Amino acid sequence: MTGFDPAFVQLGYVTADIDAAIDHFTRSAGVSQWLRWPDVVVEKEIDGAVARSVLDLAFAWRGSTMLELIRPVSGAVDIYSLRGAEDAPVTLHHIGHGVPGAEAEFEARLEAMAAAGHPVALVTRGEMGNYALLDTRATTGLYTEYLWGGPRGDALFDSVPRNEIFYQAIA
């Protein structure tokens, strides 16, 4: 893995309406160019069992921060609950951190976080790389995601549009 910044890299939001979420970020932060990825089937491990979910996703870079929009569609999507904010265009769900180095570094990070009292809520391992959400809600109010990318994951991140940074008032 070489492509993911070993620090804070992503803000992940859940939404009931990806078009409304994109409109929100276009108006509030000038982020209008997105990689849209509808009907993504994600196979993950939750509590030792394999679960499958279907998600609509969208990604955009704003400076060095990637924005991820997640619209739960079907299957094992409880972790992407809108938590009472169904009318908001977006709800912050997780903060993502890149994990540099070998895949063993990713596994060591998960073990260390679990030992510190932050259990792994889900983990996906595959051709795109490894991604895990840890339940850090008790200390941060959010999940924390760790991302370790394989060549296909690095290529996906490289294909995400980069938006110029400018500021404008929310209309």
Image (cartoon, rainbow, N blue to C red):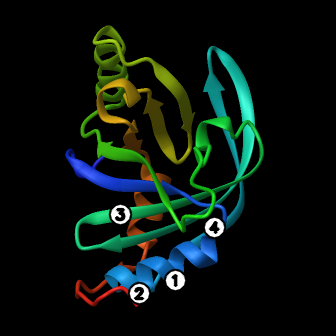
Q: Residues within 10 Å of mark 1 (few under 14, many from 20)?
A: some
- CB atoms of marks 2 and 3 within 8 Å: no
Residue behind mark 2:
27
Kind of residue indicated by mark 2: Arg
Tell me where residue 66 appears, x and y as whole percent: 35, 63
Which residue is under mark 4?
37
Q: Earlier in the sequence, mark 1 or mark 4?
A: 1
| Residue drawn at the location 23% of the way across and 88% of the way down | 166
Name the mark nearer the viewer: 2 or 4: 2
The earlier-in-sequence mark between 1 and 3 is 1
Tell whether 78 sits left or right of 143.
Answer: right
Q: Are marks 2 and 4 in contact (CB under 8 Å)?
A: no
Mark pair 1, 3: CA separation: 16 Å
In front: 9, or 16?
16
Quadrant, the C terminus: bottom left
Within 10 Å of disc 3 (Cα), the crowding (few <14, some 14-19, many 20+) is many
What amino acid type should be assigned to the residue bearing mark 1? Asp
| CB-based contact (under 8 Å), mark 2 and mark 1 | yes
What's the distance in space between the residues labelled 2 and 1, CA to CA? 6 Å
How far apart are the alpha carbons under marks 2 and 4?
21 Å
* Residue type beneath disc 4: Trp
Q: Mark 3 — residue?
A: 66
CA–CA distance in space, label 4 to label 3: 15 Å
Determine which quarter of the picture holds residue 48. Answer: top right
Q: Residue at x 36, y 21 (%)?
A: 110
Q: Is residue 9 above or below residue 19?
A: above
Find residue 31 and name its label: none
Q: Position of residue 15 (x, y in %)?
A: 59, 60
Q: Quadrant of residue 81?
A: top right
First along the sequence among labels 4 and 3: 4
